[in-house]
Image (spheres, rainbow, N blue to C red):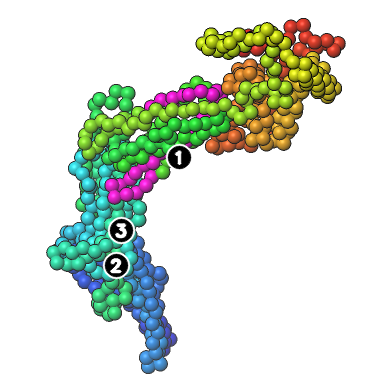
Amino acid sequence: MVIIRLFCLTLLFSQLLSFASFAAEVRAIADRDRLNLGESLQLELRVDGKPDGEADLSVLEKDWELLNQSQSKQISLVNGEFNRSVVYSLTLMPRREGELAIPALCFGSDCSLPLPIRVLAGEGPSESAESAKVLLEVEFDAAQVLSQSQVLLTVRLLHRADLLRGSLSEPEPAGVDAVLQKLGEDRKYQTRRAGTLYGIIERRYAIFPQEPGTLSIPPLRFDGLLAGTPSRFDPFGHQGERIRLLSKPKTIEVLPPASDLADRSWLPALALTLEDDWQGRVMEVTVGEPATRTLTLTSEGLQAAQLPELQVGIPPGFKSYPDQPSRKDQVGHTGLTGVLQQKVALVPTRAGRYLLPAINLEWWDVRGGQWRTAHLDPVEMVVKPAPGTTAAAPDAGAPPAEPEIQENEPSPGSAAVQEHIALPPAPPSAAPSGFWFWLSLALGAGWLITLMLLLRERFKRQPPLESQSDENPRRREKTARQALLQAARNDDPRATRAALTRWIATLWPGEPQAGLERLYRSAPAPLRVELERLDRALYAAAGEVWTGQALIENLTQWQPPGRNRAPQNGLPELYPASSTDERIVQ
């Protein structure tokens, strides 16, 4: 019985020894026990043996920020026994100053001992500003700013050690509603401070506060990795030195707009210019043909979204097709420059001379502290009639009119000569000699016979007078109308507009300058809508897909004024339409 008890105790003791041999040993080692706020700490966890679980690092979150972690494994054979160890490398950043501690870190039931760490106050490394490895500067370009005007914020990162990588937080304006826009790419250059050469990474922002008050910029944070120096954990400096910087908060006063706004738009700018590609010249255009006017508004210190659309006066006799304004922001040494470009297509409908009114835009000069006006002079336009709509010229094939010759009457010129010069009296026999008389008679008879033959041949080739005066204009109008319909069937807006101009010339040949406007006024509403749609397809900058079917339907249902009653039974109209009737129809 005693032997059995002794055997059980021996077995239990051996089991306890085996468990002890398998228990892991956890050790925590820090590279230093004193550091400044903003500096990182290297912590090494060495685990010998097989741990009883995974590491629980959540206990660090209260006072420390885990920036990076890595691990390495080692296996060795000593006296025939395998020894296994794992090394965890942690990079920690303190969250606050004071007497902190790295708590016990456990792998299941295997834990390390706590480590006391002292964190000193400061916003950066322990070195002074003259010898700091990294500096973070934030500044405004002014102490005060007007509401909705631009203020520049400049952020500079100065480093005298090699910067392997880093990240900088973005400014977050507070206090008043504001629009923030980054200006271009980061700028890199070098400078010397207190005899020390620094590399600089500069970043600029344009801020537009939208209301009066106090604009504040909370501290910006920089997290970076500098080229490391050798240490007990990194003898070759491969891991680098992690660093965190916080900038000082910045504030600026935002003033209200000028009190004398009245009906002005509030445009606080450093400079503002207004340009017009039609300035300084007389514009010559043709009825029915578009001319595009381009206006450009450029402002330093304002966003393009802040610029108002320009009000362009359009005189009667024009149709306008404005394009959607284009806006873009440009970056320069003064900050942001907004550009607004506005295009409008003008289509004249009547010939004549016109004057486009002047354009004025008031703005506030931020540098000068006063109102200024951007001005464009009036533009003179000369509108010429469309080709093919001029007054009809006389028929070149018609024989010239012959002056009447009255025999036995002296000419006025001869009488005048006789008044001033005393001529001797004529001989009693004033009759022509026989030879000359018969020669003149023969020549006159021959000319008369030739003229009769020519007239006879011409009357054979030409239709009767009634047809020439009535059917030919109608035939020309019909031909032009068919050409117009065919161009519309082809869905060709340019060919349709050209055919429309030729057709209008056959409708009102005596009034070429007002023909297009007259068509718009005399046509019914559906036809006017289709004519407007044709103009938009041609002249509007955006354009649209145009089909001519609707125009064809409206044209076939409409007859020009004064031409809607055809003669019956082949008889001419009792009261043919005259130009006076056509004016009444308007």
Q: Which residue is mark 3?
A: 187
Earlier-in-chain disc, 3 versus 1: 3
Reply yes or no: does residue 330 show up in magenta: yes
Mark 2, other Cα within 10 Å: few <14 / some 14–19 / many ≥20: some
Question: What whole-number distance in Å separates the C-alpha atoms at marks 2 and 3?
Answer: 15 Å
Q: Amino acid at mark 2?
A: Leu
Q: Is 52 left, or right, of 443 in this rendering?
A: left
Q: Which residues are magenta?
A: 329-358
Residue in the foreground of this view, choosing between 104 and 498: 498
Q: Is 248 left, or right, of 45 in this rendering?
A: left
Q: Residue at x 21, y 34 (%)?
A: 369
Res. 115 image quadrant: bottom left
Q: Residue at x 41, y 25 (%)?
A: 357
What is the magenta segment's predominant secondary structure? strand
Q: Which residue is mark 2?
A: 163
Position in image of residue 397 (x %, y %): 73, 25
Q: The residue tagged with tag 2: helix, strand or loop?
A: strand
Position in image of residue 319 (x %, y %): 53, 26
Residue 317 appears in the figure: yes
Of badges 2 and 1, the one in the foreground is 1
Q: Which residue is mark 1?
A: 326
Quadrant of the rendering where the C terminus is positioned: top right
Is the residue 272 above or below the residue 472 in the image? Answer: below
